[in-house]
Every structure is written in structure tokens, then in C-alpha cells.
Image (cartoon, rainbow, N blue to C red):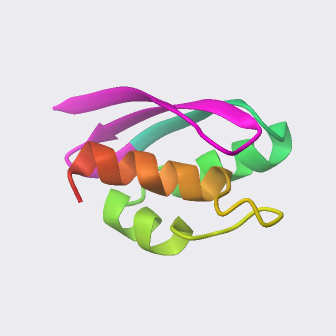
Amino acid sequence: MENKTVYTCSGTCSRAIEIALEDGTIRSVEFVGGCHGNTQGIAALVRGMRASDAIARLEGIDCRGRGTSCPDQLARALKQMTGR
């Protein structure tokens, strides 16, 4: 069963992330706002990846000393969706 959410970002240029998961696998990711090329790249790289693997790779990435980043926000959203 597909699980969809819109996660509101905090501390980044991206305002939100639209995510679809199916059985723990990322089906689609779309960032609203942010550096378009970078966020498209992140979305393409994680498509088809297990959410747990994406969390492990992206969690804690920092952008310009903000304490978070678009990839980190994606990891936070995935954790919230999967209950981790």
C-alpha cells in the first residue's frame, strides 16, 4: 500500500517535500523550493531506495552551519513516515 505525505521543512531553502513510500521503498520525492538542480538530484538518487537506507545516508548532513539541509530534512520526513 502506498503511503504519501507532505513534510514541511524547517531551516532550509526548501519549503516542503512531497514523498510517496510503498512497503518501505521510496516511490517518489519532490521538493518544493530550494536549489532545483540539487533537489532533483537527491530525489532521483533515492527513488527506488529503501527508506531506512536513505535515512542512514542523509541524516545529519549540514548546509552552511544551519544544523540541517534538504537531504537531512528528507531523512527526518522519512523517519516520521516510517516511525523510526
User: Which of these two is toward me, 67 or 22?
Assistant: 67
The number of callouts visible is 0
| Corner quadrant of residue 81 | top left
Q: What residue sits 55% from the left and 67% below the top?
A: 58
x then y, percent, for residue 18: 50, 29
- The residue at the point 33 percent across, 54 percent down is 79
Q: Main secondary structure of the magenta part?
A: strand
- State the residue lying farthest toward the left: 1
Q: Position of residue 38 (x, y in %)?
A: 79, 49
21 versus 55 height, above or below: above
Left/right placement of residue 64 relative to residue 31 reads right
Residue at the image point whose x is 66% and y is 50% from the top: 70
**Vertical placement of 52 versus 70: above or below?**
below
Q: Position of residue 76 (x, y in %)?
A: 44, 53
* The C terminus lies in quadrant: bottom left
Of residue 7 and residue 37, the one placed in the foreground of this image is: 7
The magenta region covers 1-26
- Measuring 73% from the left and 59% from the top, which residue is drawn there? 66
Horizontally, is 36 left or right of 59 in the view?
right
Q: Quadrant of residue 45?
A: bottom right
Tell me if 18 is positioned left or right of 66 in this view.
left
Q: Is residue 7 magenta?
A: yes
- Taking depth in this image into account, of 11 and 33 the one nearest to the observer is 11
Q: Quadrant of the N terminus?
A: top left
Q: Position of residue 37 (x, y in %)?
A: 83, 43
